[in-house]
Image: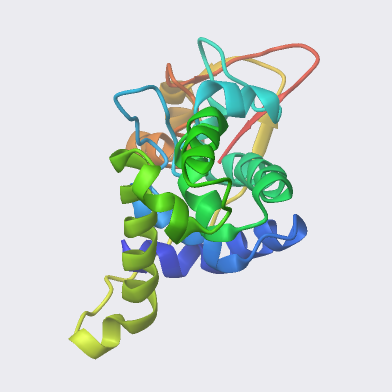
Amino acid sequence: ALGKYAYFKDTLSHILEKYGIPTEIQLVAFANTFLNQSYQSGTGETGCWPLPFYVAKKYGLTQNSYIDERQDIYASTHAAAKSLAELYHIYKEWYLEIAVFRSVPLEMNKAIRKAGNSLDYFVVEPYIDEAYRKAFSRFMASMYVANFYSFHQIQPIPFKLPKLDTVCTPRTFTFKEISQGAGISYQSLLSLNAKYKKQMVVHNKPKAHCFR
C-alpha cells in the first residue's frame, strides 16, 4: 500500500491543491481503503476515498448500471476535493472535517451541539460516533506510517503502472473485444478501468467514454 501511495502521491496532491486542500488530506483515502479503487463498504460507499452515492451525484460523477466513476481514482479525487472544500467552508477545522467526511453533516452537527457548539475536534470527539472517531484515528496513524516507515525498517513494495494511453470511443466495446483487438491482457483492463461495472465501455450519446 505504501508503494501505491508513493506512486499516486504527486498526482493526488496536484488535484487537492487545485481546490485549496492541504496535500496531507490525501491520506484520508490511504487510511480508509489503501487507495483501492474497487473498495465497497457495507453501507454503499465505494472507491478509494470512498464516496457515498449522494456526494458523487452532487459533484457530477456518472453512476448508472454500467459505470461508477467513484471507482476512478482521478474523477473521485476531484469530487472528494470539492466536498472537502465545501466542508471546510462550514467547519473551518481540518481534523473535524476528516471525521465529518466519513460521517454526514447532520450527525456531526449533533455532536457539535452536545459539545457546546465547539469546533475544536478534541472537544467534540467524545460526542462523535465511534465509527467516525476511528476515521480520524486511522488518518493520524496513516500520517505517521507514511512519513516515518523507514524508522521501523519497513520497505515499501514498489508500485508502477505500465505505460498508459487513454482511448475514447463513441462505440460500445466489451473488455474481451478490447483485449483481443489491442493485445492488452483482460486482467490489466479490469484493474485499470474499475469504474466499468459490466466490463464494457458503453456508447452513451453525446458523451464518449474513455478507457486506459
The total of numbered circles placed on residues is 0
Residue depicted at x 63% and y 66%: 22
Residue 58 position, x and y percent, is 68, 25
85 and 182: which is toward the camera? 85
Q: Which quarter of the figure is the N terminus placed in?
A: bottom left
- Above or below, 170 against 35 in this view is above
36 and 125: which is toward the camera? 125
> In terms of image quadrants, where is residue 6?
bottom left
Q: Is residue 27 left or right of residue 22?
A: left
Q: Is residue 205 left or right of residue 167?
A: right
Q: Which quarter of the figure is the C terminus placed in?
A: top right
Q: Is residue 70 left or right of residue 152?
A: right
> In terms of image quadrants, where is residue 39?
top left
Residue 185 position, x and y percent, is 37, 39
Residue 181 position, x and y percent, is 50, 30
- Above or below, 188 against 45 in this view is below
Residue 206: tell me if it is visible.
Answer: yes
Report the coloring of the rendering.
rainbow
Residue 179 position, x and y percent, is 43, 31
Q: In the orientation shown, which residue stands out farthest toward the bottom?
A: 151
Residue depicted at x 68% and y 57%: 15
